[in-house]
Image (cartoon, rainbow, N blue to C red):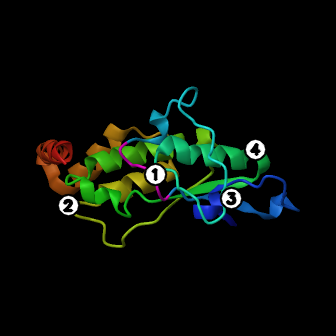
Amino acid sequence: CFLLYHELLWAPQKEKLDNPERFTMMFAPITRTFEMSYADVDFDNSIPTPKPYMRNKIILPNSLEENLSYLFEWQKAFKGDSFVYDYPLGRAHYGDLGYMKISQTIYRDVSYLSNLHLNGYISCQELRAGFPHNFPNYVMGEMLWKKTRSYEELIEEYFSALYGENWQSVVEYLEKLSSYS
């Protein structure tokens, strides 16, 4: 496995991998935002040209589009297996008190992976990222297992099992909390 992270975000200008079938590419966009999903990107108009590499003077991308521009440059040079190592529960979840916005972003990201030619997803996260609930992890696991599930189906299944017949009131409250944060 080789990693697209920090200095290694930049695709090689002339070097090529020997025996590329032996490798898997891991895209790790640590500076991406989780205010939007991969599915929200305007791929026709908003993907910039990656900035040139300058040794010891790199400026990391600060948008989802810019991060993806580096992935796409690598994909021109490497056609093998790849996955994303992403960070939705690393720190972004702290800004979502109800955990519903981050759950929706995870749902949409995982649903969209095949459009990015990414074949899997690993989440870098705190082990105890579970307050007020563990729905983001549930969404992640269920969508990696069966991408055809609807978000509404996941909400009902999870929260009705957790809170019983009044689950919809709890979801409404959590969605309000998320909208305030």
Would you name the residue on which mark 4 appears?
Answer: 76
Mark 1, residue position: 32
- Foreground of the two, 80 or 150: 80
Task: Identify the mark nearer the N-term, 2 or 4.
Answer: 4
Q: Which residue is situated farthest in the top direction here?
A: 44
Residue 157 x %, y %: 30, 48
Q: Mark 3 points at which residue?
A: 25
Which of the 4 image quadrants contains residue 59? Answer: bottom right
Q: Which mark is residue 132?
A: 2
From the viewer's perspective, is the residue at label 2 or at label 1 nearer?
1
The amino acid marked with disc number 4 is Lys
Among numbered discs 2 and 1, the one appearing first in the sequence:
1
Q: Which of marks 3 and 2 is nearer the N terminus?
A: 3
Q: The magenta stretch spans which residues?
A: 30-35
Seen from the viewer's position, the closer of residues 3 and 63 is 63
What distance separates the C-alpha of mark 1 from that of mark 3? 18 Å
Disc 4 to disc 1, C-alpha distance: 21 Å
Secondary structure mostly seen in the magenta stretch: loop
Upstream in the sequence, badge 4 or badge 3? 3
